[in-house]
Amino acid sequence: MRARIYQKAKTAMQSGRADAASWVLEFPRHDRAIPDRLMGWQSSGDTLRCVHLYFDTADAAAAYADSYGIEYTIYRSGSRRPKRRAYADNFAFGRRQAWTH
């Protein structure tokens, strides 16, 4: 049983980093998904695929996996460097791009 530990990415519908600081321990799919003949939904006998455990830090998730004998891989995301922008920069005299409006 192998798990992966990663930090959730922010969704496109969020402007902030809400709930992106938590770390997730989840298991990969072991069985293939089979479409249901009646409804067409995806079904599988793999119940570990539904397990998502949330932790505050990667070390806490790793300690949990170690305590239960779960092999894991930690995927760390790259650091973000947000660009500071101000609305007034759109009207600056030294603007490099042509004004299009």
Image (spheres, rainbow, N blue to C red):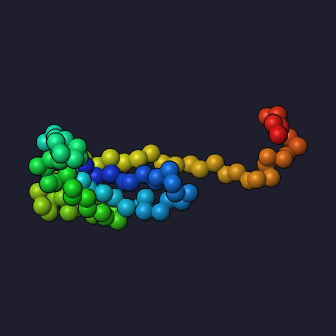
Query: The C terminus is located in which quarter?
Result: top right
The spot of residue 28 in percent (x, y) is: 21, 46
**Foreground residue among 75 and 14:** 14
Q: Is residue 89 left or right of residue 7?
A: right
Residue at the image point whose x is 38% and y is 54% from the top: 8
Residue 60 vs 73, above or below: the answer is below
Residue 45 vs 96, above or below: the answer is below
**Can residue 18 be spotted in the picture?**
yes
Residue 32 vs 12, above or below: the answer is above
In which quadrant of the rendered view does residue 52 lie? bottom left
The spot of residue 81 in percent (x, y) is: 56, 48
Q: Is residue 24 left or right of residue 46?
A: right
The spot of residue 47 in percent (x, y) is: 14, 54
The spot of residue 37 in percent (x, y) is: 16, 42
Residue at the image point whose x is 37% and y is 54% from the top: 7
**Foreground residue among 29 and 8:** 29
**Can residue 33 be spotted in the picture?**
no
Residue at the image point whose x is 28% and y is 52% from the top: 5
Residue at the image point whose x is 15% and y is 47% from the top: 44
**Foreground residue among 37 and 79:** 37
Q: Is residue 77 left or right of residue 68?
A: right
Residue 54 vs 46, above or below: the answer is below
Q: Is residue 61 left or right of residue 88?
A: left
